[in-house]
Image (tube, rainbow, N blue to C red):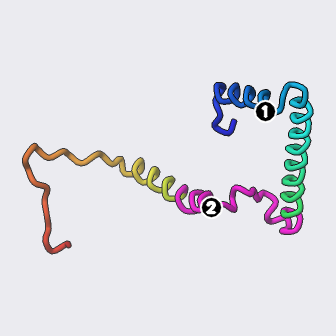
Amino acid sequence: MFGIGPLELVVIAVVAVLVFGPDRLPEFARTAGRLLRQVRQMVTNAQNDLRSELGPEYADLELQDLNPRNFVRKHLLDPVDEYVDKTVTEFNAEPAPRLPAGQKPPFDPEST
């Protein structure tokens, strides 16, 4: 949950009790819960509005797909990885043999 461990949750709870006091803490928790519920409802409504405005061809659109990093990973890197995996298994590629200690690798001056 957000990268927070159990010890950090306990520390946050203790600080909340000290800052808000045991009398106001339940009221604060209810207010925070209502706020979180409203934010989630707003996000859901925005997603539904976006999907309805874009039309049926974008019905499976996810907001994470709009992140450039996810877009590149999904559309550029995944197909390359699948192709490489298929090519390696297709040709049964074996690793190149290791050179003996002290031997220099072959070098072609015309290729560089």
Q: Residue at x 52, y 58 (%)?
A: 77
Please name whichever residue, 20 or 67, is drawn nearer the observer in this view of the structure: 20
How far is the residue under mark 1 from the one under mark 2? 43 Å
Numbered disc 1: secondary structure: helix
Instruction: Say few, some or many: other residues with alpha carbon within 10 Å of mark 2 (under 14 / 14 to 19 / 20 or more).
Output: few
Numbered disc 2: secondary structure: helix
Q: Position of residue 42 (x, y in %)?
A: 88, 54
Identity, as a three-letter code, of the amino acid under mark 1: Val
- Quick one: quadrant of the N terminus? top right
For this orientation, the residue located farthest to the left is: 102
Q: Residue at x 92, y 33 (%)?
A: 27
Instruction: Single out the mark in the foreground, 1 or 2.
Output: 1
**Residue 69 highlighted magenta (yes or no):** yes
What residue did someone put label 2 on? Answer: 71
Task: Note whether 107 is above or below 91 in the view shown.
Answer: below
Q: Which mark is residue 30?
A: none
Instruction: Say few, some or many: other residues with alpha carbon within 10 Å of mark 1 (under 14 / 14 to 19 / 20 or more).
Output: few
From the viewer's perspective, tell me whether residue 3 is left or right of residue 39: left
